[in-house]
Amino acid sequence: MMEVKRKKMFDPIEIREDFPILNQTIHRQRALIYFDNGASTQHPQPVLEAMNDCYVKTYANVHRGTHWLSEQSSALYEQARTSVQRFINAAHNNEVIFTSGTTESINLIARSWGDANVKSGDEILLTVLEHHSNIVPWQQLANRTGASVKFVKLTEAGELDLEHLRSLLNSRTKLVSFASVSNVLGSRAPVAEITALAKTVGAVVVVDAAQSVPHDKTDVQRWGADFIAFSGHKMLGPSGVGVLWGRQSILESMQPFMGGGSMIDQVTTDGFTWGELPVRFEAGTPPIVEAIGLGSAIEYLENIDVSEIEQHEQILVKRAYELIMEVDGAKILGPAADCRAGLVSFVIEGVSSQDVSILLDQQGVAIRAGHHCAMPLHKHLEIKASCRASFYLYNTLDEVERMGSALKKVVQRLR
């Protein structure tokens, strides 16, 4: 993997030079303003080079060959696992399972842990602001087992209602699963506090950390949860790879739900025995090059102080919040500017969110419009869709200003 020199100070202009897609006039003859980072981030040159180098110089299947190419690919693949372990402060390397993304990670838990441990009468606690990937797998589990799913309410500010959570916790609560950061409201969950509450009734805790790991310092040992899930494509890495971190003791108690090559110890005509961690949960050919790309993305992020990324995003959010509120008929969803992560979702009274997004796109501004895979939350808010501008380390204050000007023009045109 290409070595990235540590930057002396955080500078988004300097950082942008590492991202080829941001340095081309490719979008309607305009410089691209990319504010859809909550869905997927862009890729720095070192990540692209690490993946290309693997394909060109060292590619082979991992853990299966004794030839040089296989040994090199295997070493890079496991180096990526160690990078993930370090980045999230996991206690053990074998607690890091490579998956295709957050969705597969949560489904793996629901199948491997859930099918074995959840039964009729048990309760699964979620929150109304969850992404569909942290709702549907648990609803499927409840349908298979006869368990029930209950939802924690929100406060008027759009944050989790901890008192309601306390009222729902009881001896039947088997699992509590929630997002560390809402992909719509930007509200932050107090992960360690929620985990401690869940543990008072013996519940297993799952954290959808897809929207926080790329932006905030993550310490899974401090959090105290049993599982966390996140995706590579939201943190400068490629699509097709994600991570399931699980506590070693609980992972060792779980059977694999996917069978095939790599995940076994022995196979006979009479049956099979599964392998140790982590290969037990990595059946078949894994996302080799994608995992190597994720490892390179982590190395890139480690060359930047994560606290500086968070501070930079707060500057962008506060200014975006101010500019959007200046727009006639605008309503921002979620908590105040200083109480949210690096995204702002909003609606314009009497104006279609899709129309806003399309017309902003014509001015070179890429935002998101729709329900953001959070239909229950939008129903709770009594809206069908919203616009979302989400920021990352390479976005600038000037881009936010330009979005604000473009948004005012769009709304004037639509009214």
Image (cartoon, rainbow, N blue to C red):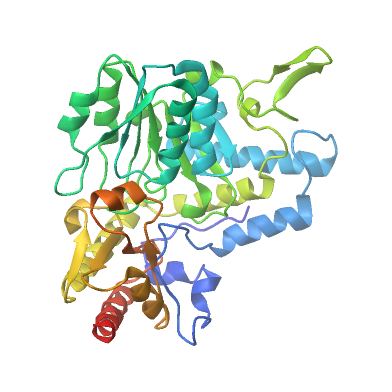
Is residue 186 visible from the viewing direction of this image? no
Q: In the rendered view, would you say 372 is above or below 326? A: above
Q: Nearer the viewer, residue 130 or 290?
A: 130
Residue 322 drawn at (x, y percent): 17, 69
Residue depicted at 49% across the width and 32% down the height? 245
Residue 219 drawn at (x, y percent): 37, 35
Q: In the rendered view, would you say 244 is above or below 297? A: above
User: In which quadrant of the rendered view does residue 77 lie?
Assistant: top right
Q: In the rendered view, would you say 88 is above or below 338? A: above
Q: Nearer the viewer, residue 389 or 91?
A: 389
Residue depicted at 19% across the width and 65% down the height? 331
Residue 31 drawn at (x, y percent): 45, 81
Task: Please state if 194 lies on the left or on the right of 44 as rendered.
Answer: left
Q: Nearer the viewer, residue 221 or 342?
A: 342
Task: Please state if 346 lies on the left or on the right of 19 as rendered.
Answer: left
Residue 350 drawn at (x, y percent): 23, 73
Q: Nearer the viewer, residue 165 or 55?
A: 165
Q: Quadrant of the C terminus?
A: bottom left
Q: Residue furthest top?
A: 270
Residue depicted at 49% across the width and 29% down the height? 110
User: In which quadrant of the rendered view does residue 390 lie?
Assistant: bottom left
* Total residue callouts: 0
Is residue 238 visible from the viewing direction of this image? yes
Residue depicted at 67% across the width and 49% down the height? 289
Q: In the rendered view, would you say 92 is above or below 154? A: above
